[in-house]
Image: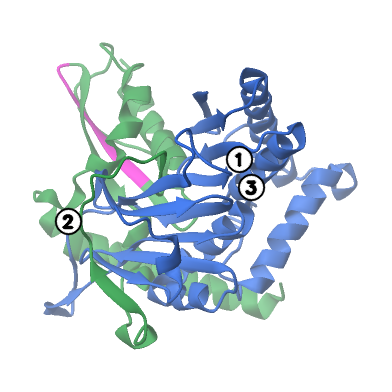
Amino acid sequence: MRRTALIMGMPVTIEVVGFTNAKAAITDTFAYFKEVDERYSTYKHDSEISCINRGLPEEQWSDEMRSVLHLCEETKRATGGYFDIEQPNGTWDPSGLVKGWAIQHAAERLSRRGVQNFYVEAGGDLQTSGVNADGKPWQIGVRNPANKHEIVKTIALTDGGVATSGTYVRGQHIYNPHRRSQKLTGVQSITVVGTNIYDADRFATAAFAMGPSGITFIEALPGFEGYMIDSSQTATLTSGFDRYVAHV
Amino acid sequence: MNSTSRTSKKILLAIGVAATFFVYTFVLRGQRSGAIIAPTPLKGSTPAVSSSSTGSYKDGTYTGSVANAYYGNVQVQAVISGNKLTDVQFLQYPNDNPNSQYINQQATPYLKQEALQAQSAQVNGITGATLTSQAFTQSLSSALSQAKS
């Protein structure tokens, strides 16, 4: 059974395979994502994070919020400051961490229920477990950032997480105003695949912020592989990425 | 964070903003009529907003608020024609940040590269960036609220 709902301003898709009470499992997962959105959305005036940004005293923060903010701090250190929830205006926006963190927790909830085969995706980031409806590893397409209708790579995954950070950029080169003849290319997206979505997502976010050297950051990260696409429609792969590639 | 690093961060930010403005003004604006800012990839986000936009807008071009999309700002301009939303253009987009535009070939000398090739595989899901969708919606809503007659 596969269902999609619009939560946190993005499509959330859950697929459960070979489980008797799939509907209840999916309903519970959607409810969990809604709870997360209520607490962490900077777009909701009454969310806890919005209250904190308006000056809610620290002693009134929930334990969960403290733990998430602690994870943000830890991620900032682990990424040399490239992951930073502090916005230019001084407010905090932990959404770069919360999405992957929520997918991870949603996946753990499904596992605790006894669901062995599932797919949990929120806005292009996902965690898989077991096999798909064909009894095969889950097949995940990597979208071409220059053409959202096009898949340029297929990842085969049983238990793991995949996250992509980037922007859908104009499919054209950008020029250096000082040297117009020299073509420059920019990173359009970086896809990170590994054992879990929480790490894949936060490290994809940081790697994208690093620009072209982001892929070498992923290369150095044990247990994670990356696929970076630049605006010249060239991909750069980490050395172990091939093991996730489905040959189609 | 200590005040020194905060100050240097602010200076870097100011340089970034100035550079972004420069690139936008002198490079992107000149190519505005071309395909360079074609909003194709975000079209998927449009229906949710345009459904509330039928009918009641005054013709004109409206600039939305600057919305934060985590690595940068998103700002759109909405064009209303015949009382309907007919076009959305990007004035700011996170990759306008020049820092993320340079591919340093030196940084990746030993990693394999390949040209992208379209595949027609059957997949269970697709991974891709959607980060700016909320910021896009926010900026567009603000542009549309100005167009309300």
How far apart are labels 3 and 1 at the CA level? 11 Å
Q: Is residue A111 above or below residue B114?
A: above
Amino acid type shown at disc 2: Arg
- The residue indicated by pointer 3 is A98
Question: Is residue B17 at least partly visible in the picture?
Answer: no
Q: Residue A168: percent from the left, percent from the top?
A: 31, 50
- The residue indicated by pointer 2 is B29
Q: Residue A213: percent from the left, percent from the top?
A: 42, 77
- The residue indicated by pointer 1 is A42
The residue drawn where x is 65% and y is 21% is: A20
* Chain at numbered mark 2: B
The residue drawn where x is 31% and y is 18% is: B53
Q: Nearest the camera: A113 or B43?
A: A113
* Chain at numbered mark 1: A
Q: Residues within 10 Å of mark 2 (few under 14, many from 20)?
A: some
Closer to us: mark 3 or mark 1?
A: 3
Whether callout 1 and callout 2 share a subunit is answered no
Element type where label 3 sits in the image: helix
- Residue placed furthest toward the front: A135
Chain part drawn in magenta: B75-82
Pointers 1 and 2 in contact (C-beta within 8 Å) = no
Whether callout 3 and callout 2 share a subunit is answered no
Q: Residue A210: percent from the left, percent from the top?
A: 46, 72
**Taken as a whole, is the magenta stretch helix, strand or loop?**
strand
Taking A107 as reference, is B34 left or right?
Answer: left
Taking B15 as reference, is A89 left or right?
Answer: right
Location of residue A108 by image quarter? top right
Q: Nearest the camera: A211 or A158?
A: A158
Amino acid type shown at disc 3: Val
Q: Which chain identifier belongs to the blue chain?
A: A
Q: Is residue B121 magenta?
A: no
